[in-house]
Image (cartoon, rainbow, N blue to C red):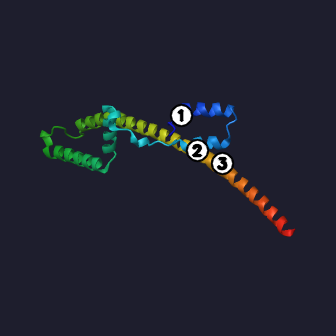
Amino acid sequence: MEKKLSKAEMVKKILADVNEDLQDEEIVHLLIDRKVSIDINAKKDDEYTFGQKAADKMAGFAGSWPFIIIFFVILICWIALNLFMMTKAFDPYPFILLNLLLSCLASIQAPLIMMSQNRQEQKDRLRAENDYKVNLKTEIIIEDLHHKMDHIMKEQAALQKYLKEKDEK
């Protein structure tokens, strides 16, 4: 059984073989034998830093309906509590403390969500590169199959012509 070649070794082998008049068929078989697709989502959780995990969880929760509902309920309770307490309210109207807390939450939440989006963009870039490699390999193989079909059709036409001439004699 032949050992698996790394991408660099495979390219070097192809280039070396091309210099030695490697036939197209051998190049196609090298492509067919080598898997080019990878699973982008297979990265394990222990490969992520604590900050990356926290950013993903924060973005996942902050972009969900439970967060919106809980946040809305807390805001209504905060405002209602302070309106009913009137003179003894800990944050009377215009709710300056609430505005401060909302600003602090936004200033912390926005960078965490952006970190998560940056990592998602990195995954998307890897996925696009992976798709390109798979599509390129598929295109090369299909082109080779097309050439083989053309060759077979030419051979078949020649064979039919030969048989027709033989039948006429």
Q: Which numbered disc covers residue 144?
A: 3
**Residue 106 visible (yes or no):** no
In terms of depth relative to the viewer, which is nearer, 167 or 110?
167
Q: CA distance from mark 1 to mark 2?
A: 14 Å
Instruction: Assign a secondary structure to mark 1.
Output: helix
| Residue that badge 1 annotates | 7
Residue 137: assigned label: 2
In the image, 84 versus 141, the foreground residue is 141
| Identity, as a three-letter code, of the amino acid under mark 3 | Asp
Residue at position x 75%, y 56% in the image = 155
Q: Position of residue 35 (x, y in %)?
A: 51, 42
Residues at marks 3 and 1, CA–CA distance in whole angstroms:
21 Å
Mark 1 or 2: the one toward you: 1
Sequence-first tag of 3 and 1: 1
Work out which quarter of the rendered image holds the C terminus and state it: bottom right
Q: Is residue 118 or residue 147 the one in the foreground?
A: 147
Task: Say which element carries label 3.
Answer: helix
